[in-house]
Image: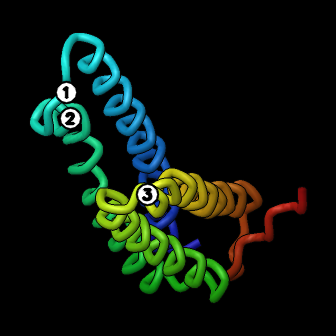
Amino acid sequence: MSAMRTVYRFWITIVAAAVVLQIAFAGYGAFYSAHKVADATINEDTFDEGWGLHVGFGYLVFLLTLVAVILVLVARPGKRIVLMTVGALALVIVQIVLAWIGEEVPAVGMLHPLNAFIILGLVGTLAAGEWRAKKMGMSSQAAPAAPAP
């Protein structure tokens, strides 16, 4: 495996961990808001206090995924992995748009958490595939496909 492939393997693992953390931050925002509403009527500032970490970290996830695309293009691990990584970036962009629209249209906003789990599945599959390829000592360009469920 090339050195850039190794960098990509570690980076996509960081992206997967960041997505898990981002989902946890959403849980914090929800329970923070629920806790505050029990005390009194919640205002926008109080709501933003609970969700600020989730919002801010979401943009970091976008940047991490953008760097992953650059790394995968340099590493050249094979067309499938490149396309999956670019697809992850596309889904993260959709995620941001869903959040923006969801603030005004809750029916669209409900797609935001569903898309988060799709992103997690995709980057998790990429990370697991990279570690599996390393374990198998693959020197070829493509990691093995994940087994069918």
Disc assigned to residue 47: 2
98 w.r.t. 116: above or below: below
Judging by the rendered image, the residue that carries numbered circle 1 is: 42
Query: Closer to the N terminus: mark 1 or mark 3?
Result: 1
Judging by the rendered image, the residue that carries numbered circle 3 is: 109
> Residue 16, how many percent across, how many down?
49, 52
- Label 3 is placed on what type of residue? Gly
Disc assigned to residue 18: none
> Residue 135, how many percent across, how many down?
71, 54
Using a 10 Å C-alpha cutoff, classify the residue at mark 1 as few (fewer than 14 neighbours), some (14 to 19) or many (20 or more): some
- Asked whether, in this view, residue 38 is left or right of residue 130, the answer is left
Name the residue rendered at 50%, 54% in the picture. Answer: 110
* Nearer to us in this view, 43 or 85: 43
> Residue 58, how many percent across, how many down?
30, 54
Query: Closer to the N terminus: mark 3 or mark 2?
Result: 2
Name the residue rendered at 43%, 72% in the picture. Answer: 94
C-alpha distance separating marks 1 and 3: 20 Å
85 w.r.t. 24: above or below: below
Query: Closer to the N terminus: mark 2 or mark 1?
Result: 1
Name the residue rendered at 34%, 73% in the picture. Answer: 66
